[in-house]
Image: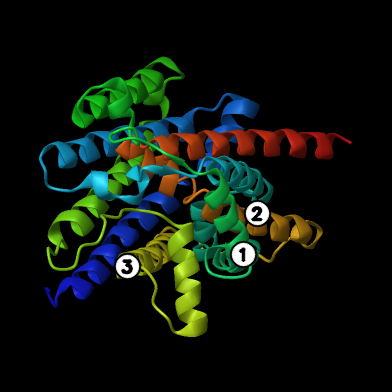
Amino acid sequence: MNGNLPTLLSLGGLLIGLVFGVVAQRSSFCTVAAVSNWVLMRDYRQVHAYLAALGVALIGTGLLEWGGWVAIADSSYRSARLDWINLSMGGLVFGFGSMLAGGCATRTLIRTAEGNLGALVILLVLALSATATLFGVLEPARGWIAEHSALYLSDGRSAFAGWLSVPPALAAVMGAALCAAVVLRVGDWRDHAGMATAGALVGLTIITGWWLTGYLAYDEFQSAPPLSVSVVGPVARGTTYVTLGRITGSLFGLFLIAGIFAGALLSALVSGSFRLVPPDGSRLGVYLLGGFLMGVGAVMASGCNVGQGLTGLATLSLQSVVATTAIVLGMRIGLWWLQRVTSR
């Protein structure tokens, strides 16, 4: 076993997180904003950023798999087990909660780094509820649902390439072409080219994560599935480390979260956007509920809008399609509910 692997994963995760944090802070990258701005104002900036990120991640992930550099098929997203109820229910719960909280898990982490104390409250509740769902009192219920509803897919059917009977690289190109077509036909991306550039950089961090964990840190004597950018799972594992002193999972995820926070904080300080903002007392209950639902939902869905919606979709995983569809639907339901409540 290579004794330098822990250092490589730690430093690599930290650096990738730093880049992600800076880009996300400067661009306000957020799927909740993409959904709400599109629906309410026909503002496509965040949609274009997300699609640019997904398109780049698809191409890079497909190339890594096609070249045999990273065993993408061994990642958790390509598991033959499809926990469809957890994925769909968890996605709906996460999406609804993120709309209540006013931002996804990633955006909540970024806003905390910017000095928003309301976001800090949401982040703490999210961390506790995610930990309880992954390791604690809610884990048996999650496991019971999976045990009694899981579907097992035949070889190759865990990815869309298998359903289309085409090579994974070709399916990735097709997916990226679809993303590009939407960007070019819906709205005018030239009015906010910087957002599309920011999205492309986010996509590059996902590719780099696969390359680091699946190629540079590959060890034939200690097999571990490749990983890339995700937020809620590492936050839960980080909470376990802080409270119990126990490391679970890869060091990559722990240092990735630290890097995202540090990158966002540095960016906010340099740009002058760091400000301590107290939480809105009238919305404290909504914050708590939103954070709780995000933590529970993301663990049930095996990822959030970044873990499933970008990293997972970049593998053309069927489970990621189910989870991401449910997340977006949950956000839309949450927006509808907020509109009804505020109109009374």
Q: Is residue 41 above or below residue 121?
A: above
Q: Position of residue 246 (x, y in %)?
A: 42, 81
Mark 3 lies on residue:
250
Q: Nearer the viewer, residue 10 or 91?
A: 91
Are the residues tagged 3 and 1 within 8 Å (C-beta)? no
Gap between marks 2 and 3, in whole Å? Answer: 25 Å
Mark 1 lies on residue:
129
Q: Quadrant of the N terminus?
A: bottom left
Mark 2 lies on residue:
293
Of the residues shown, which amino acid type is indicated by label 2? Leu
3 or 1: tag closer to the N-terminus: 1
Is 58 positioned to the left or the right of 65 in the image?
right
SS at mark 1 in the image:
helix
1 or 2: tag closer to the N-terminus: 1
Q: Residues within 10 Å of mark 2 (few under 14, many from 20)?
A: many
Gap between marks 3 and 1, in whole Å? Answer: 20 Å
Residue 155 can be seen in this image? yes
Is 88 positioned to the left or the right of 271 in the image?
right
Q: Position of residue 147 (x, y in %)?
A: 53, 51
Are the residues tagged 1 and 2 within 8 Å (C-beta)? yes
Gap between marks 1 and 2, in whole Å? Answer: 8 Å
Of the residues shown, which amino acid type is indicated by label 1? Ser
Residue at screen point 34% across, 21% down: 178
Q: Residues within 10 Å of mark 1 (few under 14, many from 20)?
A: many
Of the residues shown, which amino acid type is indicated by label 3? Ser
Q: Is residue 326 above or below residue 76?
A: above
Is 147 positioned to the left or the right of 191 in the image?
right
Q: Nearer the viewer, residue 195 or 93?
A: 93
Q: Position of residue 318 (x, y in %)?
A: 40, 35
Q: Quadrant of the C terminus?
A: top right
State the image quarter where residue 162 is shown. top left
